[in-house]
Image (cartoon, helix red, strand yellow):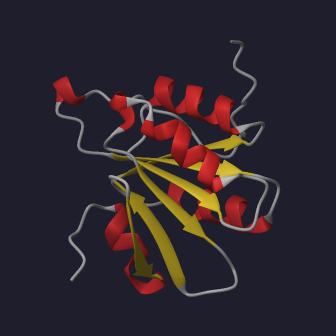
Amino acid sequence: MHLKCKSTSLTYKILFDEANGDSMRHILVVNSGSLLEQGLARLLAGKDGLDVLSIDFISEEALVEYSVSVFPDVLIVNRVASVNLAKLLGLLAGIPALGHLQVLAVGVDSNMIDVYENRQIYELHARDFYGFLQGVPIN
C-alpha cells in the first residue's frame, strides 16, 4: 500500500531509538485542518522532552501505516474531526508493535481529554495534559 500521508512543515521528526537511550516522548498530531490541531502541534513542538510530528489526515489505514513507520508514543486526534475513532482504534488493536500507543482525543467542547490505552479509556483533565505527555504519572 502506498503511504498517502504527508508531514506539515511546522514540525520535525526524530525517529524513536530505544537502543540509544532515547528519552524523548514522541507525539504524532493528526491534522484534519482545524486550528486546534495546528495550534497543539506548534505549542508542543517547542516543549523540551517532546518530539512532535504533525501529519495531514487522509484515512485511518494510512494513519496506522504511518504510525508503524514513525513509532510514536502518543497519537493526538480531534474528537470531532474526520477521523473515525472507533475504526482507528480497531485497526491499531491489530498491530502488536503499537500496543504501547496512547491515543488522545481532544476537542474544544470540553476541558477533558479522552485517553485510549491498552483497550481501556479514561479521562484526563486539560491541566494535566503537558505532564501526561512528558510521562509524569497523573494522580
| Percent of width and height locating residue 122 | 39, 73
* Residue in the picture at 63% in, 46% down: 87
- Examine the rendered structure and indicate whether residue 5 appears above or below residue 85: above
Q: Position of residue 28 (x, y in %)?
A: 53, 46
Given residues 129 and 105, the one toward you in this image is 105
Instruction: Tell me which residue sits at (38%, 35%) in the image.
Output: 98
**Residue at 53% across, 48% down:** 89
Q: Which residue is farthest top?
A: 1
Q: Return the residue nearer the eye: 108 or 45.
A: 108
Number of numbered discs visible in the structure rendering = 0
Give the farthest residue toward the right. Answer: 33
Quadrant of the rendering where the C terminus is positioned: bottom left
Which residue is depicted at the point 79% across and 54% down?
82
Q: Position of residue 118 (x, y in %)?
A: 32, 52
In the rendered image, which quarter contains the N terminus?
top right
Q: Position of residue 23 (x, y in %)?
A: 23, 44
Place residue 120 in its image quadrant: bottom left
Residue 59 higher or lower than 113, as above or below: above
Question: Where 33 falls versus 3 (above or below)?
Answer: below
